[in-house]
Image (cartoon, grey):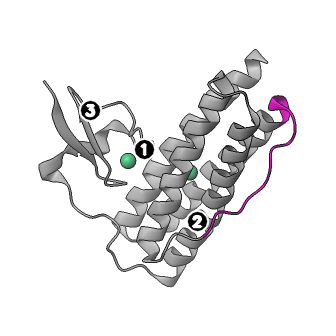
Amino acid sequence: MAKLYVCKICGEPYIGGTEPDDCPFCGAPKAYIRPVEEFFVLWKTDMTEEEKKSVEETLKLEMNATAYYKDVASSQEKYSKYERLYKQLARVEQEHVDLACKFLGKEVPELKGEKSKGSIEADLARTKELESHAVELYTGFMKSSQNSKVKILFIALIHAEQGHEEIVGKEIEKE
Ligand SMILES: [Fe+2]
Ligand SMILES: [Fe+2]
């Protein structure tokens, strides 16, 4: 039976028989995809200067990743495996851009970022590098945040980026 769920991290709605394993929009773990009645706004919260800096840094990383993955997707054959992979990676990173902007209470800036490295092997390797760097950075931000809502944001981001790292790692092994 179809039910309406909302992701407690990104706020996106989802209709399905059961909650998905990860949020299809922001990649948050299943535990945060809840019946619509339980939803509350996570991002309206007072942050310390240090927390704001962490979220600003996050925004920069996520903007670069979104622009980069979009560029890689557009360099692949339409509907090929890698075009699909990079389309979804870009979509999730775009959601992270939006989420960082919601926390900072600012408009989503124009995307800027790096370009495809010219071969899928090089792009997969660069992607793995970006994702593991993000996981490392967000782990530090999560630990140093006092605000529980900011902590939750980073827990969800870490989960999503670890998923990206894992899937890209598997593709590198196959290539
Ligand atoms: Fe989400
Ligand atoms: Fe991200």
If you read the primary sequence from the N terminus, does the residue marked by circle 1 or circle 3 appear first?
3
Q: Which stretch is magenta?
A: 110-122
Mark 2 nearby-residue class (10 Å; few <14, some 14–19, many ≥20): many
Residue at the spot 64% in from the left edge and 66% down from the top edge: 60
In the figure, is residue 154 to the left or right of 168? left
* Residue 154, image x, y percentages: 47, 56
If you read the primary sequence from the N terminus, does the residue marked by circle 3 or circle 2 appear first?
3
* Residue 69, image x, y percentages: 67, 45
* Residue 133, image x, y percentages: 69, 51
From the Cβ of disc 1, is ligand 1 less than 8 Å away?
A: yes
Q: Could you tell me which quadrant the C terminus lies in?
A: top right
Mark 1 vs mark 3: give the one in front.
1
Residue type marked 2 = Leu
Type of secondary structure dominating the magenta stretch: loop
Q: For residue 54, which quarter of the picture?
A: bottom right
Q: Which mark is residue 92?
A: none
- Residue ID for mark 2: 59
- Residue ID for mark 3: 19
Q: For residue 86, which quarter of the picture?
A: top right
* Residue 11, image x, y percentages: 31, 54
Residue at the spot 56% in from the left edge and 54% down from the top edge: 139
Residue type marked 1 = Phe
**Disc 1 + disc 2, Cβ < 8 Å:** no
